[in-house]
Image (cartoon, rainbow, N blue to C red):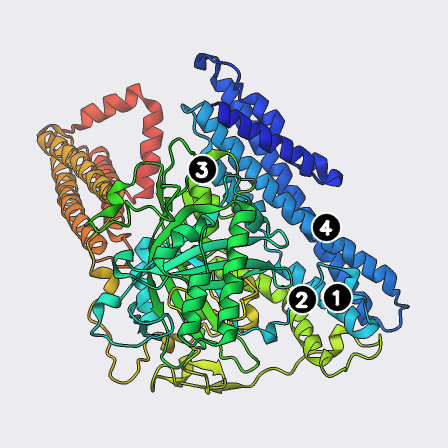
């Protein structure tokens, strides 16, 4: 508890010191919420329902305050950028470059501060709620926070549209007014047209994993990798099943203060990350590489700047700083390696060992996962990687008295031992299983790039959830060391894990529409920006009269291409023609490389909110094109059953209970009708009109039988639909309709025939059944009002 108190004190102090003074009043009032917890009170009985209500109310008010501010400030920044853009398009207005540049710098600074504000407040809410649930475990506020963050998602605002606008405006200044490059360290922008690839990260729920893989397999084959060969030796051999879905191991470094984690999450300039990576089991002596990634401020991404392949026997001495490289250098010289290779090798060793020593880092966390890769051999335009069974394992030795890993070893030897189930050595708190699979899509980007409609539909469906900037390293540290109180920030996606990612297909459809509308809003600026970059290289921008509106690029030519899917219908493969002369040696690279890890290539620079530059064909552009679902390539037939239906049936108990409740309701209706039937039938001889009573009894008896049969039918029909995973409707109006019509008919017959007989007795003075005229006259004599009412009814029914 003492360490926890120190943590909250540290966060409160950091919040106070890093607050943006102009926005101080809009930050989370962390100290006030902390006081409401009454942490200093030892007796738990002092925490009452009223105290809980006060805390929850204050927490909700803080959420409302932060959300409102982030939303309003984001809109203000966006409006400011729009006004600046209008100035560039008005050639008649005097253009003040200095004033424009200053305003643009200030706006970019506000955007940066808003992102920090967002991250700091999100961390504060997560920490105060975790503290509440720890101090007062009888009351859990975490579910409430999940619900409120879903309705007030201040932490999920996407800043990509703002950054694109800012970049376009700075590019305009550079091309037209020889803007001093030193004016802004934040305004550097890397032309997307010069990038080789874009990558996007998504989560897949386990229930949707097979369906997602089946969707991809219709367009891309599975990539097979042989670990005994080098990392670049890929081949496609369906008979080698042992190499399918290889297990990837990545061992990440950090120090006891988690400086690498905190700097990477905050994207601090010159921040780095370090890891050891291998495929499969160490018993098979796989290729082991050490990689260091450095933050590139120009594209806001981490790129591999140092990579070293090394044997396992050297790793212990390497990470402890006792590695002697001279022996390896002599061996390389003896083997006849080129001097450039030897020089690069020695530089990498020196740089990596210096980095380990200067930052005092050590192996602290391992990620283990199975990887399935999809790619067409010889075609590197699109690649998909799915990592499943993702697990994070602690391997630190921060606690010298009770280290998890032997400080003299580079890894945990217990879980890498040659036994059947090495993970059985893991104790509670030493590992964390990630509940979802991670899909990473890598698309080649150039001026002639193709647009893959099937991929656009997949990433916009309910089967996946996009998570920008997701990192296994960040997620692993956050999940294993959050309680160690040294994490300055928490990743924005952290709350989504507990909240869940399963979405209703209809809801996903609506969200996709909203997303398309939002992306369309910024499409003009992005198009103008790309045009300016293209025109800039041709020195077209020579005067200030040039503006965005004069720089629209021609739309790319849309052609039909069916090379990826054989001879299937051209209607569902509308793409932009691309260069097919891809180098087969560069199209597959390392299997163990993802968008978190893609090395030796230009890094992707955007999230799915910027996918419009790649996927311009929206999911709903051709809503009437149902042929896309039924046209199949030659040799492919429609399956008799779907893969999603082949696994074990997993249905929540509440689904079965709901069906049983409906069945019991119908049985209740049948019981009521049967009671009414036998009561009327048994008393028919004593009724004024026995024949009418028998008729009504038979009507109610028919409804009783129908209710029982209908209950049995509906129960079995719904059970079959559930078992078949069918999308048929569970509702059926015919049963209630028949019951309603039957009851209405019985009431009408009872009313009409009953009063008809009564009118006949009064008019003819003839005794019918048990009703005598004298009895009727005596009744009317004592109840005169009924006489008038009956006469009125007799006239209505024609008697």
Q: How far apart are marks 1 and 3 (CA)?
A: 46 Å
Residue 170's disc number: 1
Residue lying at 77% horizontally and 57% vertically, measured from the top left: 105
Q: What element carries label 1?
A: helix
Dot in front, 2 or 4: 2
Q: Distance between the residues labelled 2 and 1?
A: 9 Å
> Mark 3 touching mark 4, by CB under 8 A?
no
Q: The C terminus is located in which quarter?
A: top left
Q: How far apart are marks 3 and 4 (CA)?
A: 38 Å
State the residue in front, 281 or 794.
Answer: 281
Residue 162, picture quadrant? bottom right
Residue 437's disc number: none
| Residue 444 visible in rendering | no
State the residue in front, 19 or 391.
Answer: 391
Dot in front, 3 or 2: 3
| Residue 41 visible in rendering | yes
Could you classify mark 4 by the number of other residues whose Cα lies within 10 Å: few (under 14), some (14-19), or many (20 or more)? some
Residue lying at 62% horizontally and 56% vertically, measured from the top left: 159
**Residue under numbered circle 4:** 110
Q: How far apart are marks 3 and 2 (CA)?
A: 39 Å
Residue 398's disc number: 3
Could you classify mark 2 by the number of other residues whose Cα lies within 10 Å: few (under 14), some (14-19), or many (20 or more)? some
Residue lying at 19% horizontally and 23% vertically, measured from the top left: 775
Q: Is residue 71 left or right of residue 368?
A: right
């Amino acid at each position: 508890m003492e360490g926890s108190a120190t943590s909250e004190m540290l966060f409160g102090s950091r919040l106070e010191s890093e607050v943006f003074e102009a926005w101080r009043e809009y930050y989370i009032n962390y100290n006030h919420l902390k006081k409401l917890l009454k942490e200093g009170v030892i007796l738990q009985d002092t925490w009452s329902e009223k105290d809980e209500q006060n805390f929850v109310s204050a927490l909700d008010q803080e959420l409302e305050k932060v959300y409102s501010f982030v939303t309003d400030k984001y809109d203000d920044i966006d409006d400011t950028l729009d006004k600046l853009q209008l100035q560039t398009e008005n050639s008649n207005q005097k253009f003040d470059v200095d004033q424009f540049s200053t305003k643009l710098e200030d706006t970019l600074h506000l955007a940066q501060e808003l992102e920090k504000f967002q991250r700091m407040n999100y961390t504060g809410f997560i920490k105060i709620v975790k503290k509440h649930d720890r101090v007062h475990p009888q009351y859990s506020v975490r579910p409430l926070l999940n619900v409120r963050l879903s309705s007030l998602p201040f932490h999920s605002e996407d800043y990509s549209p703002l950054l694109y606008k800012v970049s376009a405006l700075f590019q305009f200044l550079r091309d037209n007014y020889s803007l001093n490059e030193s004016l802004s360290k934040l305004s550097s922008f890397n032309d997307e047209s010069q990038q080789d690839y874009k990558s996007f990260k998504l989560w897949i729920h386990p229930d949707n994993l097979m369906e997602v893989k089946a969707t991809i397999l219709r367009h891309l084959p599975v990539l097979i990798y042989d670990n005994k060969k080098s990392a670049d030796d890929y081949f496609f051999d369906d008979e080698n099943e042992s190499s399918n879905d290889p297990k990837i191991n990545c061992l990440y470094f950090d120090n006891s203060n988690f400086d690498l984690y905190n700097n990477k999450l905050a994207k601090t300039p010159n921040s780095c990350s370090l890891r050891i990576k291998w495929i499969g089991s160490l018993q098979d002596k796989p290729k082991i590489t050490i990689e260091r990634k450095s933050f590139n401020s120009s594209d806001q991404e981490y790129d591999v700047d140092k990579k070293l392949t090394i044997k396992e026997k050297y790793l212990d001495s390497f990470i402890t700083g006792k590695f002697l490289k001279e022996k390896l250098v002599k061996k390389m010289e003896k083997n006849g390696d080129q001097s450039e290779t030897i020089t690069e090798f020695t530089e990498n060793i020196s740089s990596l060992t210096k980095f380990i020593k200067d930052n005092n880092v050590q192996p602290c966390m391992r990620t283990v996962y199975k990887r399935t890769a999809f790619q067409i051999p010889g075609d590197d335009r699109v690649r998909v990687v799915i990592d499943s069974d993702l697990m994070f394992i602690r391997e630190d030795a921060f606690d010298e008295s009770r280290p998890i890993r032997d400080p003299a070893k580079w890894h945990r030897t217990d879980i890498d031992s040659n036994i059947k189930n090495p993970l059985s050595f893991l104790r509670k708190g030493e590992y964390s299983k990630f509940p979802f699979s991670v899909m990473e899509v890598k698309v080649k980007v150039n001026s002639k790039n193709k647009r893959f409609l099937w991929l656009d539909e997949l990433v916009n469906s309910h089967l996946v959830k996009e998570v920008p900037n997701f990192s296994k390293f960040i997620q692993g540290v956050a999940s294993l060391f959050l309680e160690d109180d040294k994490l300055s920030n928490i990743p924005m996606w952290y709350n989504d894990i507990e909240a869940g990612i399963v979405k209703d297909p209809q809801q996903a459809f609506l969200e996709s529409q909203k997303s398309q509308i939002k992306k369309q809003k910024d499409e003009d600026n992005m198009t103008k920006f790309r045009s300016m970059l293209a025109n800039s290289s041709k020195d077209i921008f020579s005067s200030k009269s040039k503006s965005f509106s004069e720089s629209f690029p021609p739309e790319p030519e849309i052609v039909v291409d069916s090379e990826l899917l054989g001879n299937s219908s051209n209607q569902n493969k509308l793409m932009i023609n691309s260069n097919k002369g891809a180098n087969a040696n560069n199209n597959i690279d390392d299997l163990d490389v993802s968008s978190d890890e893609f090395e030796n290539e230009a890094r992707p620079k955007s999230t799915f909110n910027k996918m419009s530059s790649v996927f311009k064909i929206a999911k709903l552009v051709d809503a009437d094109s149902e042929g896309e679902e039924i046209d199949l390539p030659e040799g492919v037939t429609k399956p008799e059953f779907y893969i999603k239906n082949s696994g074990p049936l997993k249905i929540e108990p509440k689904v079965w209970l709901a069906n049983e409740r409906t069945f019991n309701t119908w049985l209740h209706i049948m019981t009521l009708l049967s009671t009414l039937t036998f009561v009327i039938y048994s008393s028919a001889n004593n009724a004024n009109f026995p024949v009418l009573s028998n008729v009504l009894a038979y009507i109610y008896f028919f409804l009783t039988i129908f209710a029982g049969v209908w209950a049995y039918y509906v129960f079995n029909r719904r059970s079959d639909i559930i078992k078949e995973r069918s999308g048929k409707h569970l509702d059926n109006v015919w049963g209630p309709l028949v019951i309603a019509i039957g009851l209405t008919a019985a009431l009408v017959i009872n009313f009409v025939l009953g009063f008809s007989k009564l009118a006949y007795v009064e008019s003819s003075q003839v005794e019918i059944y048990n009703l005598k005229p004298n009895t009727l006259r005596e009744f009317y004599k004592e109840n005169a009002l009924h006489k008038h009412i009956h006469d009125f009814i007799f006239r209505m029914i024609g008697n």
